[in-house]
Image (cartoon, rainbow, N blue to C red):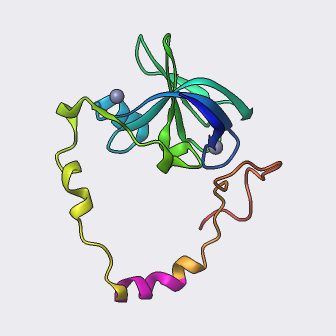
Amino acid sequence: MKLAEPLSGGCQCGAVRFSVREVGRASICFCRMCQKASGSIGGAFVAAKDFSYTRGAPAHFQSSSRARRGFCANCGTPLTFETAHGVDFSIAAFDKAGDLPPVIQLSPETRLPWTDTLTELPTRTPEEAARVAPEYAAIRSYQHPDHDTSAWPINTGPTAP
Ligand SMILES: [Zn+2]
Ligand SMILES: [Zn+2]
């Protein structure tokens, strides 16, 4: 699907930024490789038919004879799944990740058993939320914002204690 407006995205630190002008199928894969590569429940990817890097470029790990996975060498954010057939980008790395809903799940047989009930988990009570709010309000984020920037410091301020 050719996009009317390119979709931008990038890693957590902002050293790698990309622009995608045409997308294919969006999917979520629950195979063990996608779980390991994302450090999470699986990999949600969208095929990028036409794209460019607008800042930096990912480093790669050859995860199989068929595929390599791109990540930011500075902050570690998983970014791509690449084969001879093309490059897929991690959906959550897009600035508007909500605009790319997966239309198919892959490798459901290795889905972690607790994945299906995640949205039924309890959430913080209003009292608990109020108790942690001041601590959260004091946090300074070093994460790149969800839009392109002309310049962005890669490391800002003191490291966490
Ligand atoms: Zn980064
Ligand atoms: Zn997978």
Tell me the residue at 77%/50% (across/down): 149
- Left or right, 63 with respect to 112, comes to right
Res. 144 in view: yes
Q: Would residue 130 be counted in the magenta stretch?
A: yes
Tell me the residue at 39%/36% (across/down): 43
**Where 81 sits versus 138, above or below?**
above
Q: Which residues are magenta?
A: 127-134
**Where 6 sits versus 143, above or below?**
above
Single out the residue that lies furthest toward the right. 150
Tell me the residue at 60%/73% (across/down): 139
Where on the picture, by quarter, is residue 15?
A: top right
Q: Would residue 99 be counted in the magenta stretch?
A: no
Question: In front: 158, or 1?
Answer: 1
Give how far across and how far down residue 134 sits, in percent.
53, 85
- Left or right, 89 with respect to 108, comes to right
**Where 153 sits versus 20, above or below?**
below
Res. 56 in view: no
